[in-house]
């Protein structure tokens, strides 16, 4: 019988004051956030980003001119890798499913995240390494989707 762990992670944030407006645009242009047709959504996202960017930049300016999430996310990935390493040694799961956040991330970000987690896992032999999968969000929250996938079994 195979065992599966379920883990959640965050959305991300701008890494500089110049990235605040594009971050806001991308956030509000996501169909999971604003459920309207694409053209209207991009227009609305641009309007929200333009209006909110000055206030958001001021807030991020007080937090070191960027979101604190990237260093926290990197630390989280390393800690998760250490946790996965211990769980692998204890339970020998076939796979770990990672889900959560409101946005579907790019393939590059998924690969980066898995690489960061694996880097924290230490010295697992290749045959000991469980699969690490990022669950796509689709219509549902990542936690619900990951839980449903776990109930169905990892394929």
Image (cartoon, rainbow, N blue to C red):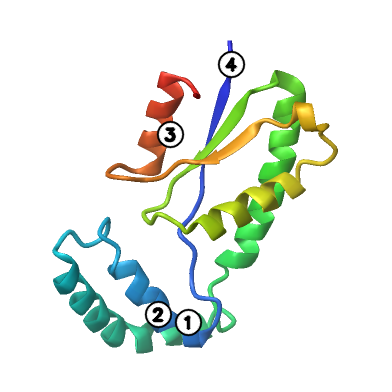
How far is disc 1 from disc 3 in space, using C-alphas? 30 Å
Residue receiving disc 3: 146
Residue receiving disc 2: 22
Residue receiving disc 1: 19
* Helix, strand or loop under label 4: loop
How packed mark 2 is, by other alpha carbons closer than 10 Å (few <14, some 14-19, many 20 or more), is some
How far is disc 2 from disc 1 in space, using C-alphas? 5 Å
The percent coordinates of residue 31 (x first, y second) are: 25, 59
* Image position of 128 with respect to 63: above or below: above
Q: Earlier in the sequence, mark 4 or mark 2?
A: 4
How far is disc 4 from disc 2 in space, using C-alphas? 42 Å
Q: Earlier in the sequence, mark 1 or mark 3?
A: 1
Residue at (76, 27) in percent of width and height: 128
Residue at (69, 19) in percent of width and height: 91
How packed mark 3 is, by other alpha carbons closer than 10 Å (few <14, some 14-19, many 20 or more), is many
Mark 2 and 1 residues: CB-CB less than 8 Å, in contact? yes
Q: Earlier in the sequence, mark 3 or mark 4?
A: 4
Image quadrant of residue 40?
Answer: bottom left
Residue at (70, 28) in percent of width and height: 87
How far is disc 3 from disc 4 in space, using C-alphas? 15 Å
**Quadrant housing the N terminus:** top right
* Helix, strand or loop under label 2: helix
How far is disc 4 from disc 1 in space, using C-alphas? 42 Å
The percent coordinates of residue 141 (x first, y second) are: 34, 43
* Image position of 98 with respect to 104: above or below: above
Q: Nearer the viewer, mark 4 or mark 1?
A: 4
* Helix, strand or loop under label 3: helix
Using the image as rendered, state which of residue 99 and residue 125 is in the foreground.
Answer: 125
Question: Would residue 153 appear left or right of 73 to someone viewing this image?
Answer: left
């Amino acid at each position: 019988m195979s065992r599966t762990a379920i883990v959640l992670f965050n959305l991300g944030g701008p890494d500089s004051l110049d990235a605040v407006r594009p971050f806001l645009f991308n956030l509000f242009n996501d169909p999971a956030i604003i459920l309207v047709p694409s053209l209207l959504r991009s227009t609305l996202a641009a309007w929200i980003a333009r209006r909110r960017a000055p206030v958001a930049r001021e807030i991020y300016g007080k937090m070191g001119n960027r979101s604190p999430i990237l260093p926290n996310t990197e630390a989280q990935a390393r800690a998760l890798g250490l946790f996965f390493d211990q769980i692998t040694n204890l339970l020998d799961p076939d796979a770990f499913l990672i889900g959560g956040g409101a946005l579907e991330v790019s393939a590059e970000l998924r690969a980066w995240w898995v690489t960061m987690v694996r880097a924290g896992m230490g010295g697992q032999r290749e045959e000991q390494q469980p699969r690490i999968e990022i669950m796509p969000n689709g219509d549902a929250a990542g936690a619900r989707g990951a839980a449903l996938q776990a109930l169905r079994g990892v394929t």
